[in-house]
Image (cartoon, rainbow, N blue to C red):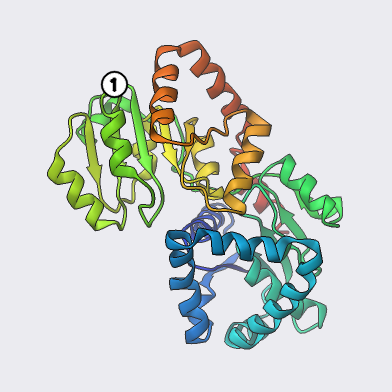
Amino acid sequence: MRVLITYVSAGGGHRRVAEAVHGYLKDNRQDLSLELVDLLPFADPFFRFCYICGYPFLVHYATWLWGFFFWMTEFKLTRWFSRKIARIMNYFSCRKFIRYLEVENFDFIISTHFLNSELASNLKLKNKIKSKLVTVITDFGVHPFWISKGTDIYIAASRATKDKLLTLGVEASKIKDSGIPFASNFIRNQDRVALASKLGIQPNMFTVLLMTGSFGLGPLEEIAQDISTVAQVLVVCANNRALFSRLRKKNLNNVKVFGFINNAEELMAVSDIIITKPGGSSIAELINMELFPIFICAIPGQEKENIRILAACCAVGYAPRNIKQINQLIVDLKNNPEKFQGLKNNIVAAAKPFACRELASVIR
């Protein structure tokens, strides 16, 4: 059985989820022939440029404009028009990918981005491919663009995500609320002392991980400097080289600085709290690692909806308005271990540790 796992490499979340699914199926389903494919190399140059450069620009410098686009494409009265325009643009910009799907005609297509799902769905509805289409929604909320009539199964992050799909007209039989897939190395039962020694940090100090994705967004320098007086701080600058250089020069007490990393699970395993952006894949990982999240720099739309849903389902959607509130929250949790443990228990209850296995069960 031939299976395509496809994503769009704008931001890291869609890719990480696709790689997690691919890794699990490769290790556990030898009966499958797998391909892992990014759509963007198939797209026209201008379209590819818009995804690779346009999205980072908007979330860096024009979040209000991103919020407007999100609202316009979600609001019922304007949705039909914006969706129609988007479909036309997507078709003419992604014809190579469409042709690839037609020629290969996979038995299953697992998509972690709404664009890939839309293109595959349209081909199914026109009887140009016979593939079964599984759409993995990589946020806890659901933008209407995720809904495509040719989708056979939707993988939802939570019960709240499933409920939203139902309100958008998706049949209950097509929804599996098994959680957002994540890589198998995101497991909590690691040796904290050994990892702390490896990373060069103190194993017994209350530790805060400061990590906001591949762009290194937000006032990380100011937060690190402020909370370093109350906790050990691990700062992941990722691709933000200027931030990395400034923090290294400051050499703050109780602050360990990292650049781009490929061992996020190790830093999570030695931490008590994570300050991060509320991306769907990041939330799935931190929940499984039993980390208490403090959210910053949420972009309008999907990330703010993620906070709202997480607050509703496990009462941990904390998004302080300023650095002072972040500091106060950390001190409160550090000094009240019973309260902190109760909140962590809520996180554990919301975990979906078998997300990959549950997804694999639909491929038959």
The answer to whether one can see residue 94 in this image is: yes
**57 displayed left or right of 110:** left
Three-letter residue code for mark 1: Met
User: Residue 328: x percent and y percent?
Assistant: 41, 23
User: Residue 6: x percent and y percent?
Assistant: 57, 68
- Residue placed most toward the observer, 69 or 92: 69
Q: Residue at x 65, y 53 (%)?
A: 360
User: Residue 363: x percent and y percent?
Assistant: 70, 58
Badge 1 marks a residue whose secondary structure is loop
Q: Is residue 143 above or below residue 140?
A: below
| Quadrant of res 247 | top left
**303 displayed left or right of 178:** left
| Quadrant of res 342 | top right
Q: Which residue is mark 1?
A: 205
Q: Residue at x 50, y 42 (%)?
A: 285
The quadrant of the image that shows the C terminus is bottom right
Q: Residue at x 48, y 65 (%)?
A: 58
**359 displayed left or right of 219:** right
Q: Residue at x 76, y 58 (%)?
A: 153
